[in-house]
Image (spheres, grey):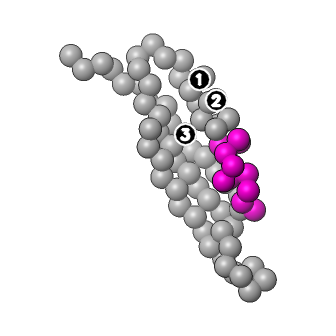
Amino acid sequence: MTCQVSGTVDRIDRAAQFTALSMRAVLEVPAGANEDQASRLLERAKQNCLITRSLKASCRLDALVRVVQPAV
């Protein structure tokens, strides 16, 4: 799995704060795996993440599930 995050910082009440976060996660699953379930698990991980839950900023997740064929 790879994950990239970019954020926007603004001054609010004279203090710098993150106001938005954009996360892109790529999860590689083996052939035959349930791609819908993998996507739902990524969303659940975002919802239950201690870090994203503690931030005031909005957090957007762009999740991609990629099926990987076994090497021959």
Q: Residue furthest top?
A: 32
Quarter of the rendering containing residue 36: top right
Residue under numbered circle 3: 63
Estimate the spatial distance between the alpha carbons at disc 2 and disc 1, rounded to whole Å: 6 Å
Identify the image quadrant of the N terminus.
Answer: top left
Q: Which residue is mark 2?
A: 40
- Element type at mark 2: helix
The residue type indicated by label 1 comes to: Asp
**How far is the residue under mark 3 from the one under mark 2?**
10 Å
Query: What residue lies at 69% left-to-right and 67% top-to-bottom?
Result: 19
The residue wearing badge 1 is 36
Q: Residue at x 64, y 29 (%)?
A: 40
- Name which of mark 3 and mark 2 comes first in the sequence: 2
- Most extreme residue toward the right is 13
- Front-most of residues 17 and 24: 17
For the C terminus, give its image quadrant: top left
